[in-house]
Amino acid sequence: MKINEHYGELAASYLFSTVAKKQAEFSAAHPEKEIIRLSIGDVTQPLARCVVKAMQEAAAEMGTKEGFHGYGPEQGYDFLKEAVCGYYAARGTRLDKDEIFISDGAKSDLANVLGLFSVENTVLVPDPVYPAYVDDNVTDGRRIVYAKADEANGFLPMPDENVKADIIYLCSPNNPTGAAYTRAQLAEWVAYAKKNDAVILYDAAYECFIQDAALARSIFEVEGARACAIEICSFSKIAGFTGTRCGYTVVPAELKRGGMSLNKLWLRRQTTKFNGVPYIVQRGAAAVFTESGMQEIQENLDYYRRNAAVIAAALDAAGVWYCGGKNSPYLWLRCPGGMKSWEFFDWLLETCGVVGTPGVGFGACGEGYFRLTAFGDAEKTKLAAAKMQKALLQLRETQQ
């Protein structure tokens, strides 16, 4: 018997597990200190009222003979797929319901969709970016090349004609940097993918935070993308489903490789390996796209936007360089005083009692940077921002 030896190539611990472990160790050593978490991208506001109502009604249905639902369609119920179509249509993007596949979240599909592709393909991953992209491909044994993201390119890498890739990961707004692509920039990636017969895996988990009309919320806003892209999205951030689990993947009918339809391949994969998302959860997800649902979820999104503005104001006052925050729940800052990412993690925890995420955990190009999240409690976020501002100003004075 042989095991998958590629698992031995992974880092000993997943980034967020390491952050949690270090936080727990600090708390155990300093029980008198309050710790404020601005690290993990987990939401803190409750589900919208209409979502809860829809799920309660669905649960009641399940308790009747007439309303009981057993196994549902693996690709999702039509009522939810049609609601997703309407969400895109309101932004001028046409989708067919048979192109939408309901899942238990973006993280799962970002890994599972790789099963459609040979391990001999080369994967292009931005650096820095969500670490699961890399880990998913390391464990499969694929070759990975990196697109460098830094201050010079606004943390938005663009295609390099000297680099050949078959699978391209794009995340916009980016996790961790918060940078987001314009339609013109995405058009360059689409042209590159078509030229190289590549497929773009577009992670749109944070599209709901985009307010700038010049920025794309879907790659399918770009002409030609339907022939070269798969879009993966989640209800985790738009509707607070991090503990409820629901997402969707869009595989256009036009997308074909090797003479085969990826839409049909993904349908075959899902009907074989996935039993679908619970009916109750899908009813709650469909309520998100109702008129009252869209209004209620905006209240939560605005709550997080205000948190981001509070953190941004503190960084501005302290003279710290950062990006993100305006069209993203994440703020990506340059560690002050030339500190390394984990060094700043320790300093911030010890000095302010604030936990963030070291940038190097998102890739080599993240070294010397740090991610803060706006998903926390508003009052605690204000307290953390005030503590950080004071400490950063004092640090700046001592270094001058």
Image (spheres, rainbow, N blue to C red):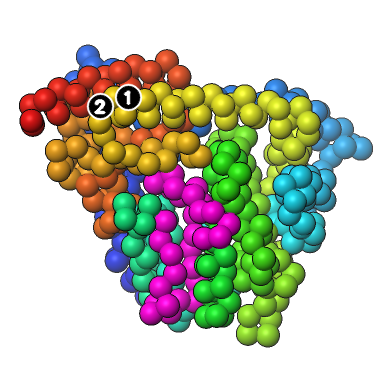
Magenta stretch holds residue 181: yes
**Residue kind at label 1, given as amino acid type:** Ala
Front in this rendered view, residue 304 or 22 = 304
The quadrant of the image that shows the C terminus is: top left
- Which residue is label 2 attached to? 318
**In the figure, 375 relative to 199: above or below?**
above
Q: Which residue shows up at 22% across the image and 40% down it? A: 335
Q: Residues within 10 Å of mark 2 (few under 14, many from 20)?
A: some
Task: Estimate the x, y position of residue 179 in percent, counting from the top left.
Answer: 44, 48
Instruction: Determine the residue positioned at 77% across, 56% down.
Output: 94
List x then y, in percent, for residue 262: 67, 73
Q: Amino acid at mark 2?
A: Ala
> Above or below — where is 134 with respect to 303?
below
Using residue 103 as the reference point, say whether residue 351 is left or right of it: left
The dominant secondary structure in magenta is loop
**Horizontally, is 62 left or right of 51 in the view?**
right
Viewer-proximal residue among 385 and 102:
385
Q: Quadrant of residue 316?
A: top left
Q: Secondary structure at mark 1?
A: helix
- Give, as a single range, the part of the protein colored magenta: 156-185
Query: Image quadrant for the N terminus?
Result: bottom left
Residue 396 appears at what percent x and percent y?
Answer: 14, 29
Residue annotated with mark 1: 314
Identity of the residue drawn at 55% across and 80% down:
195
Residue at image position (22%, 47%) is 368
**Residue 119 seen in this snapshot:** no
Distance from Cα at disc 2 to Cα at disc 1: 6 Å
